[in-house]
Image (tube, rainbow, N blue to C red):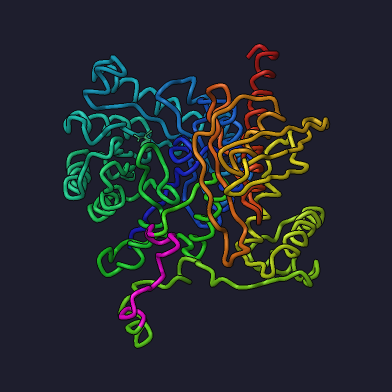
Amino acid sequence: MRKLIIFDTTLRDGEQAPGFSMTVDEKITMAKQLEKLGVDVIEAGFAAASKGDFEAVNGVASEVKDSIVCSLARALESDIEKAGEALAPAERKRIHTFIATSEIHMKYKLKMSPDEVLERAVKAVKFARNFTDDVEFSAEDAVRSDREFLFRVFEAVIDAGAKTINVPDTVGYSVPEEFGNLIKDILNNVPNIDKAVISVHCHNDLGLAVANSLSAVKNGAGQVHATINGIGERAGNAALEEVVMAIKVRKDYFNDVYTEINTKEIYKTSRLLCRLTGSFVQPNKAIVGDNAFAHEAGIHQHGLLAKRETYEIMRAEDVGVPSSKIVLGKHSGRHAFKTRLEELGYKNLTEEEIDRLFARFKELADKKKEVFDEDIEALLFDELFKSYEEAKLIQYQVVTGDKAIPTATVKVSVDGEEKVATACGDGPIDSALRALEKALGVKSRLKDYTIRSLSHGKDAMGEVRVIVSFEGNEVSGKGISTDIIGASLKAYLDAYNRYSAKSLFMEKKIQEGI
Ligand code: KIV
Ligand code: ZN
């Protein structure tokens, strides 16, 4: 049997996509869940890209013990040094260095000849070996690279000490048969290939990232790069949950391959990413979408009742989809609340955190008859992952109706000082956000607004996600409440606070002369 190495790049390729940015704490939380999921390698970021990325790689390297922690680095000594420094605390570390090998990238982007690229690649791998024995080399845009040159580069970097050679379909151009053949050709034409693992990194521009990755595995690839929910540059990367479940469900086809992923953690990991980034997966998304295990048609339901396998190839429990339970209500005590948190897998909360969460649970239970697991998780993430809070919502009031001019009054505290403003708008949310903007004294543009229900029933909590542009900087924010206006104001304030935290960081950097 061949173990397929799962290299997760949610925190690097995934996080670099617009709308998916995470703070350092959020990345560490996500990394710990990825470790629980059992991924073999966590690419925690691109240490040389920014101070935030460096801190994230460093933080993940300090916290994660079971998975290898990796940083991306261009084929430059300065990048590799930063990666080595950020990874220093890791028990097991990998440096992933890359340079483009396609003619179009070499000529127009790098302005380097093929020989110069080859030399740079070899130098980078040798330099990276000063920090760790575990070096991965990527030939960016491998799919569109000249085959003979690609084989030469791979042979040279393996000789220089690369233990993994990665074959990216950087622009998502390949199709499954062709991509599988490329892997076969690498196996047959790179003389020292037995000294390295062949890895693949597929983008989803034609919706083929998972299919291409699986074709590569069938043809001998030993590692797949993937992301949770398939997030990543443009149309994203291969979705980890789809690759893993395809291998598991179709073990008759992938008969000599297995992964060590704990599939029961898949759903939780997917939901955690949604919560941390404020993004949603489409309902029909394979494996983790809300409808992935829902059977609507009568004929299907009949078949399922007669024999589950008539319409189901895997069980919801296999990927950890919880059956929704009404867990608690307003009479539930702190002990029951804490027990439920533990049952949901949140065992390491401090007593002070549980107190804060319990107070919020009580407030919610007063407004809502039934409190579901989804509500508890939403409270948890809202409470524990609040960004630096310069501004807080104190009170709001909105008058609206088909004959009334929607008018809102909002009171906030900004750095301890109370501010109140009133504004009219096109509707209750528009007027509330205008009043908030006025109270904060900022100019902004709402670029995106989404709302969805978090659990069931008319009294379900709503989650609002916004993308707001402050002085040309786009920042995302999210908020939850049983009242959609409250959720909207909280989401906007979250974006504002994230923006202020970022501005403070920039100011500090300027003062420090960095
Ligand atoms: O898509 C790509 O080519 C990459 C490399 C850095 C591996 O993300
Ligand atoms: Zn990529």
Image position of 17 (left or right of 386): left
Q: Magenta region: which residues?
A: 284-301
Q: In which quarter of the image is residue 457?
A: bottom right
Image quarter where the N terminus lies is bottom left
Q: Quadrant of ligand 2?
A: top left
Q: Main secondary structure of the magenta part?
A: loop
Q: Does residue 228 lie above or below 449 as drawn?
A: below
Image position of 25 (left or right of 293): right
Q: Can residue 28 be seen in this view?
A: no
- In the picture as drawn, the residue positioned furthest to the front comes out as 403
Image quarter where the C terminus lies is top right
Residue 422 counted in the magenta span? no
Residue 290 counted in the magenta span? yes
Q: Does residue 456 lie above or below 350 as drawn?
A: below
Q: In which quarter of the image is residue 508?
A: top right
Q: Horizontal and vertical percent for residue 315?
A: 42, 73
Q: At 31% from the left edge and 68% from the top edge, which residue is drawn?
A: 251
Q: Horizontal and vertical percent for residue 26?
A: 61, 43
Q: How many marks?
A: 0
Q: Horizontal and vertical percent for residue 365?
A: 73, 65
Q: At 80% from the left edge and 66% from the top edge, which residue is drawn?
A: 334
Q: In which quarter of the image is residue 92?
A: top right
Q: Which of 74 and 451 is in front in this view?
A: 451
